[in-house]
Image (cartoon, grey):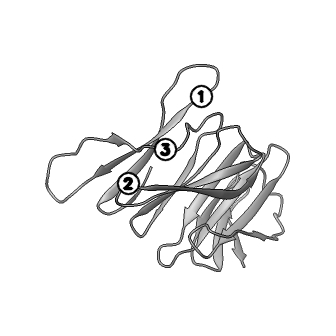
Amino acid sequence: MDFYPPNRWAVVRTSSGDIPEFGIYEAQFSGSAPAPEWTAVSLPFTPTRVQPAIAAQRGSAYVLASDGSRATDHLLVVSADDSVTDDTGPCVNAVDADLSATPVGNALWAACKTGHAESLAISSDDGAHWVPVDAERGGQSNAATIGAISGSVAAVGPPTGPLELEH
């Protein structure tokens, strides 16, 4: 789940079968009003296999998702008006991914996990273009998560402790 007031977005598993399916749900919260209804966002495909990663920034939700139709993942951008754009994400053959948005600006950081290795990437233009980040991982495993600090700095960790990256 992530939020950019007043919007909140959540990734929800929508199937119980052997191949998991996921949906993105949105709700708008305001002040002291009662909790709103969560509504499904209409996506161009049903994310499967890998739980999507989600980050919110400036009124939009960014979702790294896969449908198994191609090696690279999709980067879905859900705007405040519920329109969705589908672009190519930074991960190739990933079994898991983590996505983080900077508190200000338009940078996104991604950690792509393949089961054997992990790659990191940054986009400074809302996910339109991705640049690999060459970082000495210092023993970090495929279980690491990423946290955007700025358009040039991110923290990576655990399992062996945080590692600050500069790009």
- Is residue 38 depicted above or below 150 in this figure? above
Sequence order check: which comes first, mark 3 or mark 2?
3
Label 1: which secondary element: loop
Residue at 80% from the left image edge and 43% from the top image edge: 115
Residue assigned mark 3? 43
Q: Estimate how packed mark 1 is, as few (under 14), some (14 to 19) or many (20 or more) residues with alpha carbons within 10 Å.
A: some
Judging from the image, what secondary structure is the residue with disc 3 in? Answer: loop
Quadrant in the rendering for residue 134: bottom right
Q: Give how far across and how far down residue 44 sits, in percent.
A: 53, 44
When the figure is inspected, residue 36 is found, relative to residue 48, above or below; the finding is below
Amino acid at pointer 1: Pro
| Between discs 1 and 3, the one toward the N terminus | 1
Looking at the image, residue 152 sits to the left or right of residue 35; the answer is right
Measured from the top left, where is residue 2 in percent x and y? 44, 55
At 52% from the left and 35% from the top, the residue drawn is 22
Number of disc labels: 3
Front one among 93 and 71:
71
Q: Is residue 110 left or right of residue 92?
A: left
